[in-house]
Amino acid sequence: MTTLITNIRELLQVRETSIAKVSGAEMAILPTIKNAFLVIKDDLIADFGSMDQVPKIHPDKTIDATGKIVLPSWCDSHTHIVYAGNREQEFVDRINGLTYEEIANRGGGILNSARKLNETSESELYDQSKFRLEEVMRLGTGAVEIKSGYGLTVEGELKMLRVIQRLAQNYPITIKATFLGAHAFPSEFKENHQGYIDLIINEMLPAIAKEKLADFIDVFCETGYFTVAETQEIIKAGISFGLKPKIHVNQFNSIGGIQVGVREEALSVDHLEVMTVNDIESLKNTTTMPVALPSCSYFLSIPYAPAREMIAAGLPLALATDYNPGSTPSGNMNFVVATACIKMKMTPEEAINAATINGAYAMGISETHGSITIGKKANLIITKPIPSYYQLPYAFGSNLIDTVFIEGKIVA
Ligand code: NIG
Ligand code: FE
């Protein structure tokens, strides 16, 4: 099946040869072709270029994209979209003055979601989660990472990861699975942290590895959650089972999580709302991608990751949603890109690079996703007619998406 898209006002994120990521000053450069064509063959990008070189082919289908922008679909490298129920009562509690930490200390927060998840059957959990996955696909996301971490029991964690695996089997969107058993200490292990860590290492990890249910390992390294030493122990165990680390760090406090991530060659360190000069220094010349989650900052009214400082230091930066029931009940990458521009002072070029190629890097898939490159997956967003790509962050509340392709098929 061949599809030819013609008369594209501007084709974004065009890379002749595949690149892994963009860093520092390169982030301000978004290569584009004006008045462009693009050819999809089956699930891949087969050709693209300027309209004066449009090939003489006989496609099965032609789409006239006059006035429209085409870009690679979003790569959302950090989500928790498999969860049960919601936490709207906590949302109202926060409006009435409680903080996220106070709610967690009263047994709410992650433990509240864990209680709900363990009471929900696997098929019910699948049905609730698939609606969120279908929603983010319609919003232009073509690759997504999904974490466990609301089970906190052997059965609960396996249930979550099996649901992620079934979603990956049943939908065209690329899905990477992350084991986040170390998301919080269950109440029965409040006074026995090592007991829970042993459960993660001796029972959860072997079972997950046996069923090949995860690609990555994650830990919530934060005051009141997992210490730096505990994070290190769990990450090392994950690595011994073949899982690459991606860590939650520096959401509320800078306690050394970034340095563990760098030491263990984490694929990414995520959140970064609270960053010291030393934290930024530690990330220089490493293979670890910093990932900012601006929708979380927006929803919890906490600081935004200091994007300008990180980019000025020459670091790369990726953007993701963090879609989860507690801190970010939204999986809208369009909103993430706009909020990064509005609140973090990223330019549209930087934000689009961060949400495509750098997001792909943070999932280990930048060879196949994240740019318009021949041979990469035909994962594309065609916008409605708009004057320029500046509209994407500028018109932040509008839905500017006309068509979404995932692996060459129209999904919205
Ligand atoms: O990335 N910070 C840790 N985990 C999630 C939120 C978890 C929750 O509140 O359910 C996050 O924000
Ligand atoms: Fe998260």
Image: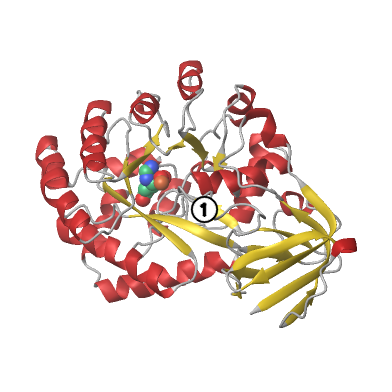
Q: Quadrant of the N terminus?
A: bottom right
Q: From the viewer's perspective, is 334 left or right of 394?
A: left
Q: From the viewer's perspective, is 120 left or right of 258?
A: left
Q: Position of residue 150 (x, y in %)?
A: 28, 55
| The quarter of the displayed image where residue 262 is located | top left
Name the residue located 33 percent from the left edge and 66 percent from the top edge: 165
Q: Is residue 125 above or below residue 19?
A: below
Count of numbered circles in the view = 1
Q: Is residue 214 above or below residue 191?
A: below
| The quarter of the displayed image where residue 245 is located | top left
Q: Position of residue 367 (x, y in %)?
A: 53, 50
Residues 354 and 113: in front is 354
Name the residue located 28 percent from the left edge and 27 percent from the top edge: 228
What is the three-letter code of the residue carrying label 1? Asp
- The extreme right residue here reads 52
Secondary structure beneath label 1: strand
Residues 318 and 124: in front is 318
Name the residue located 37 percent from the left edge and 75 percent from the top edge: 127
Residue 191 shows up from this direction: no
* Location of mark 1 (residue): 76
Q: Quadrant of the C terminus?
A: bottom right
Residues 331 and 348: in front is 348
| The quarter of the displayed image where residue 117 is located | bottom left
- The extreme bottom residue here reads 60
Residues packed near mark 1 inside 10 Å, few (<14), some (14 to 19) or many (20 plus): many
Q: Is residue 215 above or below residue 184?
A: below
Q: From the viewer's perspective, is 188 left or right of 373?
A: left
Q: From the viewer's perspective, is 239 left or right of 155?
A: right
Question: Is the shortest distance between ligand 2 and the CB of mark 1 under 8 Å?
Answer: no
Q: Position of residue 147 (x, y in %)?
A: 35, 53
Name the residue located 34 percent from the left edge and 26 percent from the top edge: 263
Residue 352 shows up from this direction: yes
